[in-house]
Image (cartoon, coloured by chain):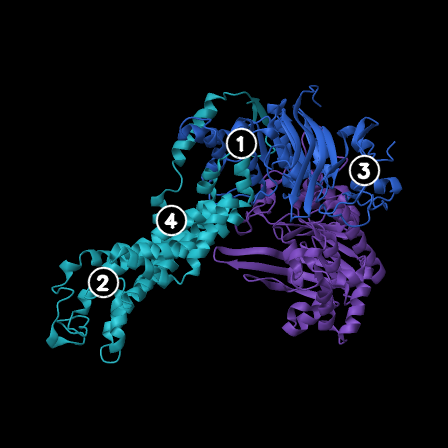
Amino acid sequence: MKIRKTAKSGPGAAVQETACPDTAAAQQEREALVAQLGESDTFLDKMRRMASDNKLAVVSAVVIVLFILLALFAPLLTPYDFDEMDLLARLAPPSAKHLFGTDELGRDVLTRLLYGARVSLAVGIIPTIVSMLIGAVLGMISGYIGGAVDAVIMRLADVMLSFPSLLLAMVIMYTLGDGIVSIFIALAVTNWASVARVVRSETLSLRETEYVEAARSIGVRDFAIIFRHILPNCIPSLIVLFTLNVPAAILSESSLSFLGIGVQLPNSSWGLMVNMGRSFLYNAPWMSLVPSAAIMLVVLAFNFLGDGLRDVLDPHLKNS
Amino acid sequence: MSEQKNVLLRCEHLVKEFPLDRKRAVHAVSDVSLEIYEGECLAVVGESGCGKSTLGRALIQLHKPTSGKVYYKGEEISAMKPAQFAPYRRQMQMIFQDPYASLDPRMTVRDIIAEPLVTHKVCGDREAVTKRVLELMTAVGVPGEFLYRYPHQFSGGQRQRIGIARAIALDPSLVICDEPVSALDVSVQSQVLNLLKDIQAASGLTYVFISHDLSVVRFISDRVCVMFLGKICEIGDSATIYSRPVHPYTQFLMNAIPVPDPHRREERAILQGELPSPIDPPKGCRFHTRCPYATEECRTREPELREVDGRMVACHHAE
Amino acid sequence: MEQMLLEINHLKSYFFTRKGVSPAVDDVSIRVPKGKIVGIVGESGCGKSMTAKSVMDLLKYPGRVVEGEILLEGRDLTKLSAKEKRKVRGEDVSMIFQEPMTSLNPVVKVGKQVREAILIHQKTDKAEAKKRVLEVFREVGISEPEKRYDCYPHELSGGLRQRVMIAMAMVCRPKLMIADEPTTALDVTIEAQILKLIKNLCATTGMSCLLISHNLGVIAQMCDYVYVMYAGKIVEQGDVYTIFDRASHPYTKGLLASVIHLDTPQTGHLSTIPGVVPNLMHLPAGCAFCGRCQEAVGRCRAEKPELYELGNGHASRCFLSIESEAIHE
């Protein structure tokens, strides 16, 4: 196509007419520019930016990684076994021998904390990721396509939400039997519906934006629009949802364990530890306080990390 | 200004309604038939609710017409299934009104302009696409160094240029310009209008220029179509209509524009009354509730478009 | 010598952000005589809306009035207490905005909203206030006022909503009405009606009007006196005929040349002002307009010009203006 090229970029400058293909000089200039500019904002660039702008988020990321490592290497970090009982040292306060004290059966609290981390972190993160994936995909499809598809998905979500989640989790656990995988499934299934609703309403408003209309006018197919335009603009909400749902999952697991489903004694999880320690709050507060502190640390860490990620992904805050 | 009179796009009895509930609907476009010739700039002018934006979108099938037919180079595109229509989609692009909302805030400029190229697999690999994007950016006057910037880092005028680059990326034959300069500052409006005129002169594409501003439209259009409440009031050559507007609405529309000259402050006839709603348009001639010349005939019978003094007018009293 | 209703002297309103200080309104002086319509014209970001909001003390954090006085009939508005400022707002000075939909409360009927404006400022009962509201509705040309009294904002058209806003602004008979782009969001035939209304109201009630617009046509048709703003400063001022016939500042000249109207030639290119408005936080060392000015000389890039008097109330912030005026003498 014939395009008038301006002599220097900018309006009001002298205009020259050139026909395609354009001059070799202009082409070379462009090639040099491409080489110089390289690729845009890569993942590494984003991480570097977060490291320099948001120390809190970096600290939080470190905390989370630390906890995960502690959980993974639990057996190597403690001389005790998680169910090793020392009946002579029951309800012992923190000391050199037991850094966080012992519980009512003489088991080392620190050890149970480390082993419990495996369950709690896994239960906090994995089902949340799964439920958010399911919820986000269904929410976006439902919101963008509308009509019968939307109706079906939303009615399904309504059904899920009308059950008390704990009851539903219990039913699923009974059906699937014991085991950590059953807990994962139960928590994933009970959580996807609220994610789907939020994502659906975001999608509904994003669908009406002019840039989505522009994409349709170009001829972009529906699925491409959803993944290129709708999903990236849903990400801030998804991050926030994630940071809210992880602690909720950890705490749900503790309720389930308390009710006798989920993690069974003598296995350990933070939620279970908190619940078991309630009866001993006056004489052995470390039993509940230590796992509570751990939950709080992890939850805060996820929150700050989530904020940091949201900022780093926001193009408005990109300095250039 | 173009001598060629090949019809590029044609619509027959085009109707677009948006149902509100079982009984009521917004009658955005009601029975519009017109032809768009290759290489021309047809301006569609009117106020809110006249249906000009809906008409533009219905012509390029962004809205599926409620009834009526649209023909592109003789082919009936309004009846095509999406898969059939896909190759035609490339030929008809759109420039949007709001420079702040028509660009995805989370995409870089490169990706925004590359989207049509990537969707239709026009260029080769990633680098080829980037080069073509740079070419387009130069063509619209956005410096190449801004390739990886985000929309919010640009001014309104520059964003609109990016939108234009995106629209011409596929080398379309028809571009619908939906109020492209209404949201821009005065000095920037002229820059963008100059650019649009240059692009048309260089590539010979066809514009449908939608606007509410008769002065802006006069500069760039060959023919003008004035709409009111979903119907065409007057359509014809710009020169004819601007020098001798026949339809009362066109006359009032021209009178209403505030003239940037303090010496010309004569009292001019102002149109009274509110804009009627497209949900419940008046019977008969839709303009009769605001028209000072309305008679009984106007209240009961809808006027047809007929030729008067070298243009088509829909008014019972046009001479 | 005309009587001055409003005198803004050396007003400075700055925005204090994390990235720096933005001088949105930088040493602006404006006079509004009694009974006249004064216009402030400029493009986005020039500071005209901020000036208006400073007068009404409606600036939101992080912006605030830093320096200057705003004299309403001799009284300095910047020195009033919050309570006194509230009294002034509505009674002596009122404001109408561009987007009536967002200025009106969507869940309250319009009649009630206008009635509230009366009840805040005057001691009457509700029935009396309602009568006054209907009176004002008629004054501003709202047809079927009783019916409209009970309407919600979304039930009214854009033109009617703007009339309601004007009614609310008029109801306490203010001495000054500030109109910030009152017709920009309206269709052109409705705009013509509203502009005529504002002009009539000023003529019949002796009210003054400070009209802010980017539309030179509106300014030409409505104003007696014009101030042109660019990058937070006044770059030219004068009576409306002087500005349109004998503009001196290159920005004003460029703006007037780039306006498109029904008589603009259709061939060739439109006249433009190249470039974009500079970022207020990174203004050049010299004149803020020098980067885009066709007539700039060395001095313009180094020194900031003052507002130079050119006689008869005409002033221009440009070194070249005084030189050319000197030549004319």
Q: Which mark is residue B302?
A: 3
Which chain is purple in the picture? C
Contact between labelled residues 2 and 1, with CB atoms less than 8 Å apart: no
Element on which disc 4 rests: helix
- The answer to whether marks 4 and 1 sit on the same chain is no
Which chain is blue in the picture? B
| Cα distance between the residues tagged 4 and 3 | 56 Å
Q: Nearer the viewer, residue B247 or C298?
A: B247
Camera-near label (4 vs 3) is: 3
Camera-near label (1 vs 2) is: 1
Most extreme residue toward the bottom, as rendered? A282
Residue type marked 4: Leu
Element on which disc 2 rests: helix
Q: Residues within 10 Å of mark 1 (few under 14, many from 20)?
A: some
Q: Which mark is residue A116?
A: 2
- The answer to whether marks 1 and 2 sit on the same chain is no
Chain where mark 3 sits:
B
Q: Which mark is residue A133?
A: 4
The tint chain A carries is cyan
Element on which disc 3 rests: loop
